[in-house]
Amino acid sequence: MKKSMTKRMIIMLLAVGLLFGAIVGYQMFVASMMKKFMSGNARPPATVTAMAVNTAPWQKQLSAVGTLRAVQGVDISSEVEGVIKKVYVKSGDDVKKGDLLLELDADQEIAKLAALTASRELAAINDKRNREQLKAHTISQAQVDASAAELDRSKAEEKAQVAAIDKRQIRAPFAGRLGVVTVNPGQFINRAEKVMTLQNTSALFVDFNMPQKELNKLKTGQQISIDSDTGVHRDGSVSALNPKVDQATRNIAVEGMIGNTDNSLLPGMFVNVHIDVGAPEQLLTLPQTAVSYNPYGSTAFVADETQPAEGDGKPTLVARQVFVKTGPRRGDQIAILDGIKAGDMVVTSGQLKLKNGTPLIIDNSVTPANEIAPKPQEQ
């Protein structure tokens, strides 16, 4: 009986052992299958562009938007009213100082001048006769004085009439280029009516404003550069600083001067003005596309090398998000003051599909713009 109980106990223990072994084996099998499943569903690699960060010379600049103004420019108008007799120029002509532009009808004024000339000649004859008679003591000194005054009055009236006729001839006040001429012979123009525009564009002023806090960085003669949206670049200098700060904007008006001998710039155009301040620095630079801006700060993705767990595969690149402190901008570039170091491989495009630990494939066949002074390209 005792041997039978022992045999039953052994059989029961073996059964329990087999059951626990089956459970453990099943759990190991499930764990193995889950590992294979998870490895098969790993995050796919993302294709991005990236570049190694390096330092580059960086010149601090003050920037502003300016407006070009001709050194000499005027809307020509007539001092008198009248009918245009002849137009001597056409639109876009280059003229010299004193060139005749147009002439108003002056027949009536010329006729009046002839009458005044005759009066002046008669007054001269009378004055001469009276002076001779005074020598013979046949007239008084008062009569001679009266004839001399009459001669002076006649000369003044004749001179005034000549000036009136000259006003009917409109001449160029300085050398320059004419604008569009819209007047024609036979047309009546009023006094002070604009007839054409004359601009001397061989040199141009550029007017712009700077915040008052930058006043100590500005001085007369300081070099400036301008860029227009037509792709024209020019160097010039600061010609004047306004001695008063605008109370409404707290800005100071600055006037610069640039050359324009090829007439590639025109008065009234807006330009971007740059003024170099201080000595050049060495700063880390990246394309502006490499930085993402968020409410909690600016970030960038660094491509880190990782070794596979088995240790027998090739190193792979994974994304790591870092916070960066950005500095000034120039063209397509931005300066990085903190957060990354020289030599780091930084993602420059494709960040929207990245998270920490995302595997990376770098393809730089097409890279973001990274120019210091980009220029517009015609399509």
Image (spheres, rainbow, N blue to C red):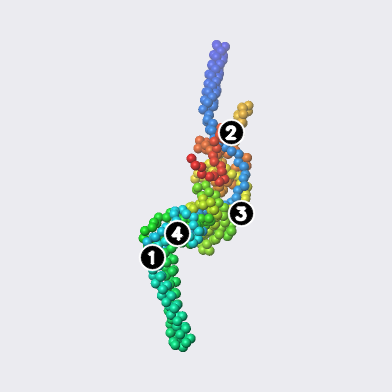
Q: Provide the secondary structure element on which disc 1 rests.
A: helix
Crowd class of label 4 (few under 14; some 14 to 19; many from 20; radius 10 Å): some
Asked whether 369 or 260 is in front, the reply is 260
Q: Which residue is mark 2?
A: 317
Viewer-side label of 2, 1: 1
The x and y percentages for residue 265 are: 51, 52
- How far apart marks 3 and 1 lie (CA) works out to 67 Å
Given the image, on which type of amino acid does mark 3 rest?
Gly
Given the image, on which type of amino acid does mark 2 rest?
Leu
The residue that appears at 53% across and 58% down in the rendered structure is 255
Mark closer to the chain start, 3 or 4: 4
Q: Is residue 188 left or right of residue 249?
A: left
Determine whether label 3 and label 4 are within 8 Å by CB. Answer: no
Mark closer to the chain start, 2 or 1: 1
Q: Which mark is residue 107?
A: 1
- How far apart marks 2 and 1 lie (CA) works out to 92 Å
Mark closer to the chain start, 3 or 2: 3
Mark closer to the chain start, 3 or 1: 1
Mark closer to the chain start, 4 or 1: 4
The residue that appears at 50% across and 47% down in the rendered structure is 230
Given the image, on which type of amino acid does mark 4 rest?
Leu
| Quarter of the image that includes the N terminus | top right
The answer to whether residue 57 is seen in the rendering is yes
Q: Which mark is residue 101?
A: 4
Q: Which mark is residue 278?
A: 3
The residue that appears at 50% across and 60% down in the rendered structure is 97
